[in-house]
Image (spheres, rainbow, N blue to C red):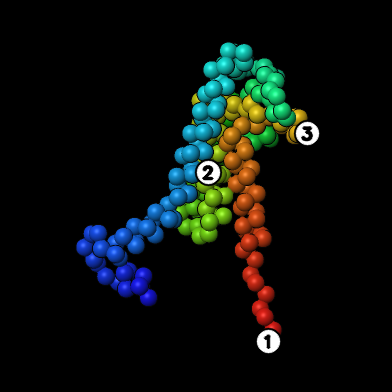
């Protein structure tokens, strides 16, 4: 009832109604902060890898094999390689295909961004924000280098692909999207009483 009254009146700034509206706007804006966080984290980690002299990443940009490997304690290693495809090396392409793939990635990211502006539900918003941040992170690499910087090697966990922060965000977002759309959004059966 209170919110209905607030939305029907134009109160001066600083009143309870305007503060309530501001809180509601901020509570629905949080996914738009997740997108740049994923993007910055992705680009920062890629910058660290590109600056690592043991990889000579820019020097091996034309090669399809790994640029080098740093063995870490535990199940993860760092293996720098250039991915000319999509996440986890799917749809490898060069030349004009690079720009076609970049255009497709941009269209998908923009489509998800539009969806995010209309989305309801915490899990759906988080899923879309993760996918969007990851898509833009990989898109930046594709435009800059013609390939994406991949470096997280989870072979110790029997995961055969080398990936990056953007790929991880896209994958987690895709799983959350699946869960939201097919498990959480199911209509509840009508009770028979």
Splitting the image into 4 quarters, where does residue 8 fall?
A: bottom left
Question: Is label 1 in a helix, a strand or a loop?
Answer: loop
* Left or right of 12 in this view: 164: right
The CA span between labels 3 and 2 is 27 Å
Residue at (61%, 32%) from the top-left corner? 164
* Left or right of 184 in this view: 142: left
Where the C terminus falls, by quadrant?
bottom right
Residue bearing mark 2: 132
Residue at (62%, 63%) from the top-left corner? 185
Q: Looking at the picture, tell me which residue is in the foreground, 117 or 21.
A: 21
Density class for disc 3 (Cα within 10 Å; few <14, some 14-19, many ≥20) is few
The CA span between labels 1 and 3 is 51 Å
Extreme residue toward the right, this view: 158
Residue bearing mark 3: 158
User: x and y percent of residue 106 in the render?
Assistant: 52, 40
- Mark 3 in CB contact with mark 2 (< 8 angstroms): no
Question: Is label 3 in a helix, a strand or a loop?
Answer: loop
Residue at (48%, 49%) from the top-left corner? 31
N-terminal-most mark, 2 or 1: 2
The CA span between labels 2 and 1 is 45 Å
Question: Is label 2 in a helix, a strand or a loop?
Answer: helix
Count of numbered badges drawn on the protein: 3
**Mark drawn on residue 193:** 1
Where the N terminus falls, by quadrant?
bottom left
N-terminal-most mark, 1 or 3: 3
Splitting the image into 4 quarters, where does residue 163 fall?
A: top right
User: x and y percent of residue 11 in the render?
Assistant: 23, 66
Query: Can you say whether 121 is above or below 56 in the image?
Result: below
Q: Looking at the picture, tell me which residue is in the foreground, 18 or 134.
A: 18
Whether residue 37 is visible here, answered yes or no, is yes
N-terminal-most mark, 3 or 2: 2
User: x and y percent of residue 45 in the render?
Assistant: 55, 28
């Amino acid at each position: 009832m209170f919110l209905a009254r607030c939305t029907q009146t134009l109160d001066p700034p600083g009143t309870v109604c305007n503060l309530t509206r501001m809180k509601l706007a901020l509570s629905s804006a949080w996914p738009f902060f997740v997108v740049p966080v994923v993007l910055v984290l992705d680009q920062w980690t890629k910058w660290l890898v590109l600056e690592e002299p043991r990889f000579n990443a820019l020097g091996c940009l034309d090669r399809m094999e790994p640029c080098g490997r740093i063995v870490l304690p535990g199940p993860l290693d760092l293996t720098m390689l250039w991915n000319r495809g999509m996440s986890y090396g799917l749809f490898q392409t060069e030349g004009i295909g690079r720009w076609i793939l970049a255009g497709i990635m941009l269209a998908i990211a923009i489509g998800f961004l539009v969806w995010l502006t209309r989305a309801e539900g915490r899990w759906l918003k988080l899923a879309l924000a993760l996918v969007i941040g990851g898509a833009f992170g990989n898109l930046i690499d594709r435009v800059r280098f013609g390939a994406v910087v991949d470096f997280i090697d989870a072979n110790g966990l029997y995961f055969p692909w080398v990936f990056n922060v953007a790929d991880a965000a896209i994958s987690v977002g895709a799983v959350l999207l699946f869960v939201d759309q097919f498990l959480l959004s199911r209509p509840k059966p009508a009770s028979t009483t």
